[in-house]
Image (cartoon, grey):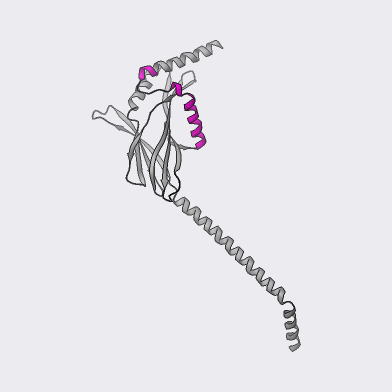
Amino acid sequence: MKNKIIKLRGFLKRNKIFFEVLAATALTITSIFVSFKANNISERQMEIMESENTPRIEIQRTQLFIDSTKTHQVSKWLVFNNNSKISNFEIEKQVSFLNVNKKDDKEITIPIIEYLNPLGKLSSQNEGLIYQFDNIYSFQDESATRQELLDYGDVNVRSFIEISYHDVLGRKKGIKYFQVSPLIQEILKDEWDSINEDWSSKSNDAIYLKYIEKNIQQIKNYYTKDLKKINSK
């Protein structure tokens, strides 16, 4: 037994450096593993924090009567923030088109100037209902235009907005894009850029809805031009 202990002691002395290196390697691997796990937890915590502090914007539309006889209506949009807190909310830009879907399956699209009234009411809250805006100057003119064009086709207005805000983390301004008429949905920047480009390319023909008679004549001229193109083929 004594001889075995002496042999073992000799073996350990001869391989002292080996065991020291092995122990150091094990400690290094352990520290790397712990550090990796800690970094993963930290990244996950950051993702959770960012998700918890990312505003979720929702837009709803309602119709209201603006007179006691209930003959004049206005479309009103309500902007809600359902997550985190934001500040400095505003509508940066609006883009709108008058669409006439003609009975011959052709479509006329004309840019509209100032369809929406972006100078809305900013809430004192930064969560829940945060902003309201309307088209009080356009609703009746849109209805009258639609009535005048019944023989030409269906009429609707497509309207889009670019919004901005600052979030609770104090990061740079957040930007989002929405279609608000006739559908309400968030859109991507690429689609917004394409819509902007389309509006700009047709801007020479842009109209104010309040000039109803002039607009009707302009739309009828479009219709006549299209018929001439079809008949010339």
Res 212 quadrant in image: top left
Quarter of the image where the N terminus is located = bottom right
* Residue placed most toward the observer, 114 or 127: 114
Give left or right: position of 82 versus 69.
Answer: right
Q: Is residue 23 shown to the viewer in this render?
A: yes
Residue 202 among magenta residues: yes
- Corner quadrant of residue 173: top left
Q: Is residue 76 visible?
A: no
The span picked out in magenta is: 187-215
Q: How many labels does the image show?
A: 0
Residue at image coords 50%, 37%: 189
Does 7 sit left or right of 136 as displayed? right
Percent position (x, y) of residue 16?
71, 77
* Residue at 65% over, 69% down: 26
x and y, in percent, of residue 99 in the image = 44, 24
Picture coordinates of residue 198, whole percent (x, y) = 49, 27
Residue at the extreme bottom: 2
The reply to whether the magenta stretch includes residue 233 is: no
Above or below, 191 against 125 in this view is above
* Residue occupying the point 37% across, 18% down: 148
Quarter of the image that includes the C terminus: top right
- The answer to which of 117 and 154 lies nearer the viewer is 117
The rendered magenta stretch, by its main secondary structure, is classed as helix
